């Protein structure tokens, strides 16, 4: 089965200049763990995830947890998130995006999702414009 037949077409994407605060609201509202980032023409230029934002808020924090002399500040995450809340997501998005084309098949999508440990995979047309997203559940739903 082709990716174009199983992908989620009704999707949300964001532009690189929206602030982190707005992205968090969008991710929560859309119930998506990650979000495609597109330019003004709808061309896929990146992806940003909840994980990327947590890592941006706490760079080096998890390495410090392993130190015996480290005393954690329980409010550190909220303090750091507040500091980056107005930053454009462009600062934290991944630019090296793994994507798949409309004409690829479901087996290729499954292989990429599993091998690369992805929750979703952007689908692009021949011009690189975002056409949809294949999620793991899309593959499973279409097996039935």
Image: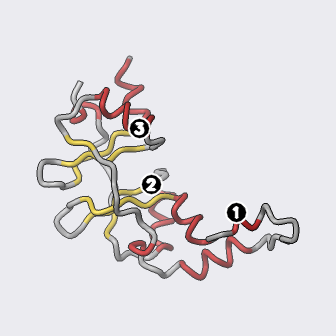
Left-right relation of 99 to 58: left
Viewer-proximal residue, 88 or 23?
A: 88
- Which quarter of the rendered picture does the C terminus lie within? top left
Q: Which comes sooner in the sequence, label 3 or label 1? A: 1
Viewer-proximal residue, 4 or 47?
A: 47
Discs 3/1, front: 1
For disc 1, the marked residue is 62
Farthest top residue in view? 144
x then y, percent, for residue 63: 70, 64
- Which quarter of the rendered picture does the N terminus lie within? top left
x then y, percent, for residue 70: 83, 71
For disc 2, the marked residue is 34
Contact (Cβ within 8 Å) of mark 3 with mark 1: no
Report crowding for label 1: few under 14, some 14 to 19, many 20 or more residues within 10 A (C-alpha): few
| Placement of 88 over or under 34, stated as above or below | below
| Placement of 103 over or under 127, stated as above or below | above
For disc 3, the marked residue is 113
What kind of element bears circle 2? Answer: strand
Contact (Cβ within 8 Å) of mark 1 with mark 2: no
């Amino acid at each position: 089965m082709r990716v174009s037949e199983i992908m989620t077409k009704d999707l949300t994407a964001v532009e690189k200049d929206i602030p982190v605060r707005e992205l968090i609201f969008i991710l929560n509202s859309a119930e998506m763990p990650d979000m495609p980032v597109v330019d003004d023409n709808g061309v896929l230029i990146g992806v940003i995830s909840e994980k990327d934002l947590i890592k941006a808020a706490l760079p080096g924090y998890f390495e410090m947890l392993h130190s015996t002399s480290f005393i954690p500040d329980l409010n550190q995450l909220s303090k750091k998130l507040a500091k980056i809340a107005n930053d454009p997501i462009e600062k934290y998005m991944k630019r090296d995006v793994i994507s798949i084309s409309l004409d690829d098949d479901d087996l290729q999508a499954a292989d990429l999702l599993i091998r690369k440990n992805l929750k979703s995979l952007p689908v692009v047309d021949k011009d690189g414009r975002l056409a949809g997203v294949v999620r793991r559940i899309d593959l499973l739903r279409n097996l039935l």
